[in-house]
Amino acid sequence: MPTPLRPRPRWRMATAGAVAALAITLLAGWAIVAAPSWSAAEVRIVAAVHGDATGMADIVALTINSAFGPSGAVLVSLIALTWTVMLRRSWRPAVRMLAVLVIPWGCAEVIKSIVQRPRPDPALLSTLIVAEPRSYSFPSGHTAFAAALACAVVLVLFRAHSRSRAVAVAAGAVVVLMTAWSRVYLGVHYPTDVAASLFLVPLVAFAVHRMTAGRAMFDPPAPGIAAEPPAVRIGR
């Protein structure tokens, strides 16, 4: 009886979408930097959100700032990977989660270094409650990490079309949108910075998820699909 074959992953369309998203995000960033009036208009939105400060909002925004910053993101990633290994009892899903998490996040950071959009001018805002970041603004790194983490957890740990995945999507969306809001609230990002991350990261994450499907390093064998038996030498 022939060994059943794993379905071939449909990764080409997802990859094309990711490449298009990278190109669009990069071109949008260059266009924004080339038109200073765009940032001048956006900073009024930042000032309005930043000026509507409350003690509870400060706590939420500062918590997100620490948890999804460079140091916090490493710790959160390690926790997510450890949880994945314990839940799935295999290192392969954790490697896949790492790829789905790091690659989109890295793409956002690369675009940030290429576009080099300055941060909102603190002189145009009320007193900042965080240190002024030294990195560039477009796209938002915190929002990119939050979106990549949500995509990695949903895509790797939850089965498609399941009720648990729907709940995970809703919870992830809340975390990502709160992160996006917090970056504008703290006065360290423009709305288009967080919008760029919300647009780019899910498309790249989905492409990475598709590309790693069915590969032995990332995806354990599906139930009912046996490994190919070793060749048997037949004597004469």
Image (tube, rainbow, N blue to C red):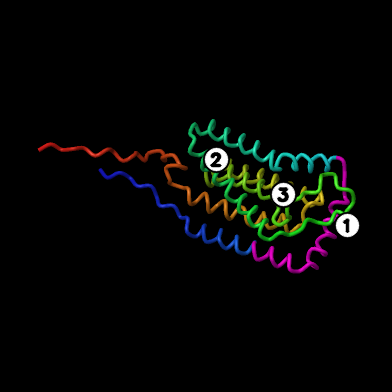
Cβ atoms under marks 2 and 3 closer than 8 Å: no
Inter-mark Cα distance, 2 to 1: 44 Å
| Closer-to-camera residue (52/236) | 236
Q: Amino acid at mark 1?
A: Leu
- Sequence-earlier tag: 2 or 1: 1
Residue at 47% x, 42% y: name it.
218
> Of helix, strand and loop, which one carries label 1?
helix
Residue at point 82%, 56% (across, down): 46
Q: Magenta span covers which residues?
A: 26-55
Comparing marks 2 and 1, which lies closer to the viewer? 1
Mark identifier at residue 124: 1
Dot 2 falls on a residue whose secondary structure is helix
Q: Residue 29, relative to residue 127: is it above or below?
A: below
Residue 9: image location, x then y, percent? 44, 52
Q: Which three-letter amino acid code belongs to the residue tagged 3?
A: Leu
Q: Is residue 37 magenta?
A: yes
- Direction from residue 169 to residue 51 in the image, left or right: right
The residue under label 3 is 177
Q: Which residue is mark 2?
A: 157
